[in-house]
Image (cartoon, grey):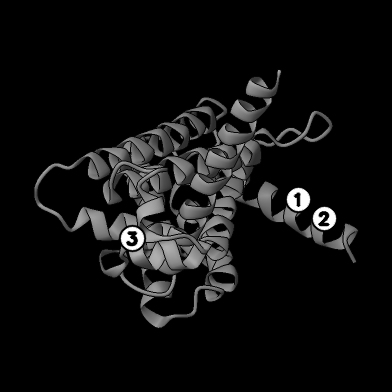
Amino acid sequence: MELLTHFKSTKQATEVRRAGLVAAALHLAAQRSPADITTADLAGAVGITQGAVFRHFASKESIWLAVLDWATDTLLAQLHQAVAGTDEHPLSPLHALQAIFRAHVEFVTMHPGVPRVIFQELQHAQETPLKARVRDLMQQYRTLVMATLQHAQAQNLLVPGTDLQAAAVLFLGAVQGLVLQALFSGQVQSMTAQSPGVFAIFLRGIATQQALLSIAHSTAHSLESTT
């Protein structure tokens, strides 16, 4: 019994320490280039020795892989939750797109280290395990956006002949553009104020006039109910 208790305690301590190192990596990545962050920096951030870092991760690369795994799981969970709405108030496809856009902006605002890690890795010309993780994240994200666009098209909410592939690229590019400008300016919080206008411009390019009027009406109603 004592051995089992010790095993559980050790396993829990390891999971907590790994989570702490991932959080430290994200915190430091929000402040400077991920390429410049050393295992000594991470050790100091969580209060352990540099050697102890390698008792929890086999290499520095494995730490960044864990960071991307956390980012993928957390972001996608928030996006799917945003799309789901509630049982009482299910979202229309266009409102779901708006919810995805808003949830992504909120995620980056809370975790600015994530896009820094992603953009850092995409600069490498060669294939790497980290780059493969980023590609997997983007593919799952794109699949969600495409499915939502297809639902909108099936409900005749989009302008006839809308190129869904191009619309998905434009959607992702709009979010990424906001993120890049926010990182360049050092004003990540600015995305919150800018994102509604950016999404509105995107929506005007793909939605029918009737769908736009419906969204404008529901948005006005929502604002009235909160005042």
> Circle 3 — which element?
helix
Using the image, determine if residue 49 lies above or below residue 167: below
- Residue 218 is marked as 1
Give the distance between the C-alpha atoms of the residues marked 1 and 3, in whole angstroms.
Answer: 50 Å
Q: Which x, y percent locates residue 182? A: 43, 74
Which residue, as the protein is rendered here, is positioned at the far top?
A: 1
Q: Quadrant of the C terminus?
A: bottom right
Q: Residues within 10 Å of mark 2 (few under 14, many from 20)?
A: few
Instruction: Locate residue 37 relative to residue 111 in the image: left or right.
Output: left
Label 3 environment density (alpha carbons within 10 Å; few <14, some 14–19, many ≥20): many
Which sits earlier in the primary sequence, circle 1 or circle 3? 3
Amino acid of disc 3: Thr
**How many discs mark residues in the rendered view?**
3
Residue at the (23%, 39%) spot, across then down: 129
Secondary structure, mark 2, is helix
Q: Earlier in the sequence, mark 3 or mark 2?
A: 3
88 or 35, which is in the foreground? 35
Q: Are marks 3 and 2 in contact (CB under 8 Å)?
A: no
Residue at (47, 54) in percent of width and height: 21
Reply above or below: 50 against 73: below
* Residue to which mark 3 is pinned: 39
Mark 3–mark 2 Cα distance, whole angstroms, equals 51 Å
Q: Do tag 1 and tag 2 residues touch (Cβ < 8 Å)?
A: yes
Could you tell me which residue is drawn at 77 percent across and 34 percent down? 86
Which numbered circle lies on residue 221?
A: 2
At horizontal 59% and vertical 41% (from top left) the residue drawn is 13
Q: Give whichever of 73, 80 is nearer the camera.
A: 73
Q: CA distance from mark 1 to mark 2?
A: 5 Å
Q: Would you say 220 lies left or right of 133 here?
A: right
Amino acid type, residue under disc 1 in the picture: Ser
Q: Residues within 10 Å of mark 1 (few under 14, many from 20)?
A: few
